[in-house]
Amino acid sequence: MQTLIKNIKGLAGVEYGTKAMAVCGKEMDKLNIIEDAYLIVEDGRFKAFGKMSEMPSGNYDTTIDAAERFVLPSFCDSHTHIVYAGSREIEYIDKIKGLSYEEIAERGGGILNSAERLRKASEEELFIEAYNRIEEMISYGTGAVEVKSGYGLSTNSELKMLRVIKRLKAECPIPVKATFLGAHAVPKEYIGRQDAYVDLIINEMLPAIAEENLADFVDVFCDKGFFTTEQTDRILFAALDYGLQPKIHANELANSGGVEVGVKYNALSVDHLEFIQAEQIKALMASQTMPTILPGAAFFLNMRLSPAREMITAGLPVAMASDFNPGSSPSGNMQLILSMACVNYRLTPFEAINATTLNTAYAMGISDDYGSIAVGKVANFYITKKIPTIEYLPYYYGTNKIWKPFLKGIEHNLILS
């Protein structure tokens, strides 16, 4: 099946020849855009593109006129927690009144609140809620998503979450990556004996997850008040036996050592990074690990901002994901993340687009097939509404600028309840 998109005002994020796995440093401010372009998709993959004056003749199953509209690769959201039960708007009030993330957690709120609700929910309930969230994310332009466990905090509940994610993989129209985050918080029954919970993760959870092939990655909340570098090291070392590459929550609340332990174990990404400093930037420069910033969480929690500009100036790549979760970032709108990247973190629009597409694809291990428009890659992309420039996307924040999302080259009809 062939689809032709013609008269495209600007075809952005195109790659010629050898495909990049990620973009770093000053290269992040480069975005190939073809003006007055065409795009041909065949059997779910990009087949050809170029200027309208060079468009080949042919018969196409579907032709779409994109006059005055831009075409971009779909966002890749490399950090979410979208399998959860209920919401946490009461804690939102606590935040408004000035309670810190740690204070809310100490009162039994935060992650422990979500864990209690999740244990009572059925797999079917969790699946329906998460599927609806993914559909909403698609409506805002997301074409790939990573989903973490971590609200179970017991073997049975963590397995329940991961089975839901496995079903999302099978039934959702976009690629889903599964991350085991049993070390998200210390459950109530293990407070005061945290090492025993780490033992449970290593000796019971990891083998059970491997037996059912439920996870692609392993994650640990390596930060102040959560898991130490020593405990993180133990979990990551044990996960090596099961082929699980790390993706680490690091340096959100303090200079925790999470970046260093992530680099030690060749983490695909280290995420949050509000407290990253020159020493950690240097460690990342010598690694293949993607530094990933979560603007929604810093905004919602009113936290200090990760030094994205310093990282890019040093020559690092930067990715930006939504951290969609009920407690600290209740939104999966990657267009909003694009705007925050520019307004709060001072990325240029081109840098922000690269940070939310190709670099987040890398942070999911899928940039060989997603994150840019290149011949042979999977045709997940979107057509914008009629907008004047590419810079208008982050500039005009708060509204959905997408006209039509396409997944595997087919216009996606949204299913929202």
Image (spheres, rainbow, N blue to C red):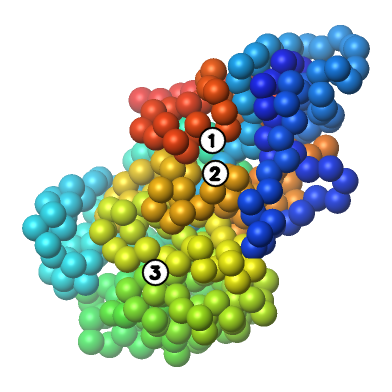
Q: Amino acid at mark 1?
A: Glu
Q: Which residue is mark 3?
A: 274
Marks 3 and 1 close (CB-CB < 8 Å): no
> What whole-number distance in Å separates the C-alpha atoms at marks 2 and 3?
21 Å
Circle 1: is it few (<14), some (14-19), or many (20+) Cα within 10 Å?
Answer: some
Q: Observer-nearest residue: 221 or 300?
A: 300
Check contact, mark 2 vs mark 3: CB within 8 A: no
Residue occupying the point 22% across, 66% down? 101
Identify the residue position indicated by label 2 in the image. 349
Residue 118 horizontal side relative to residue 401, left or right: left
In this view, which residue lies farthest toward the left? Answer: 97
Locate residue 174: give its quadrant. top right
Element at badge 2? helix
Which quarter of the rendered picture does the C terminus lie within? top left
Residue 161 visible in rendering: no
Give the residue number, with chain letter if any, for mark 1.
391
- Of labels 2 and 1, earlier in sequence is 2
Q: Amino acid at mark 3?
A: Glu
Foreground mark, 2 or 3, reads 2
Q: Is residue 146 above or below residue 206?
A: above
Q: Give the vertical position of 325 relative to 53 (above or below).
A: below
Residue 195's tag is: none
Task: Give coordinates of residue 381: x percent, y percent.
Answer: 64, 32
The quarter holding residue 81 reads bottom left
